[in-house]
Image (tube, rainbow, N blue to C red):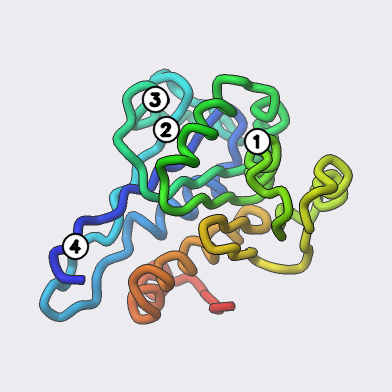
Amino acid sequence: MTNQQPRTVGILIFDDVEVLDAFGPFEVFSVAQTSDPDDTGRNLFRVVTIAETSGPVRARGDLIVEPHYSFANHPPLDILVAPGGLGTRTQIANPVLLDWLRGQLEEVELRTSVCTGAFLYAEIELLNGQSATTHWGSIDRFRQGYPEINVLENVRFVDNGAVITSAGISAGMDMALHVVEALHGHDAAVATARYMEYDWRPA
């Protein structure tokens, strides 16, 4: 993997996004580095936040976040993270965001979600005929709203290959470490979790 260009991870943010949904994976991807002795210390991912517009986003708990990019000017993405939070209840009816998501599905290598971010993918029918998960408190609502999805509970994440959904909030870090492991090997994922002092338990 020496000299391989880092993949670009785009993390969608919006008003009332759950903070750890978005920034747990942000931390994982931003600190992950190669363990190759010939290439030690190189970042494996470039991580950016993306919102509908360039203005500040008010996350849960009144955390104000200024996105790196808007839908109109972000760089090409390799990995997409759709986080959850109360804001998803509004965003599933936002045609601008849903159209942007549809467009990204043609471009990115890997589509991931955290918590109720899975509802955004469900709304554009990405998860039809697949297994998926979400926050435990939204499992029934997910099943009732999207009967064409095989909704799993009591799992940290569900890997369908090009689409990975995770359970609520902190489970997004497990999902992100799983991605690090899948793309760059177990040692890189273990080193990342160790750096974060996160008690990671690989699936």
Q: Earlier in the sequence, mark 2 or mark 3?
A: 2
Front disc: 1 or 4? 1
Q: Earlier in the sequence, mark 4 or mark 2?
A: 4
- The image shows residue 67 at horizontal and vertical percentages of 39, 30
User: Is residue 37 positioned above or below 34 on the image?
Assistant: below
Secondary element under disc 1, as helix, strand or loop, is loop
Q: Residue at x 46, y 53 (%)?
A: 110
Q: CA distance from mark 3 to mark 4?
A: 27 Å
Front disc: 2 or 1? 1
User: Is residue 150 positioned above or below 196 on the image?
Assistant: above
Q: Residue at x 40, y 78 (%)?
A: 190
Task: Give the position of the N terminus as an image quadrant.
Answer: bottom left
* Label 2, residues with CA under 10 Å away: few <14, some 14-19, many ≥20: many
Secondary element under disc 4, as helix, strand or loop, is loop
Amino acid identity at mark 4: Gln
As drawn, the label of residue 4 is: 4
> Which residue does the numbered mark 2 point to in the structure image?
50
Residue 80 falls left or right of residue 44: right
> Which residue does the numbered mark 1 point to in the structure image?
124
- The image shows residue 201 at horizontal and vertical percentages of 56, 78
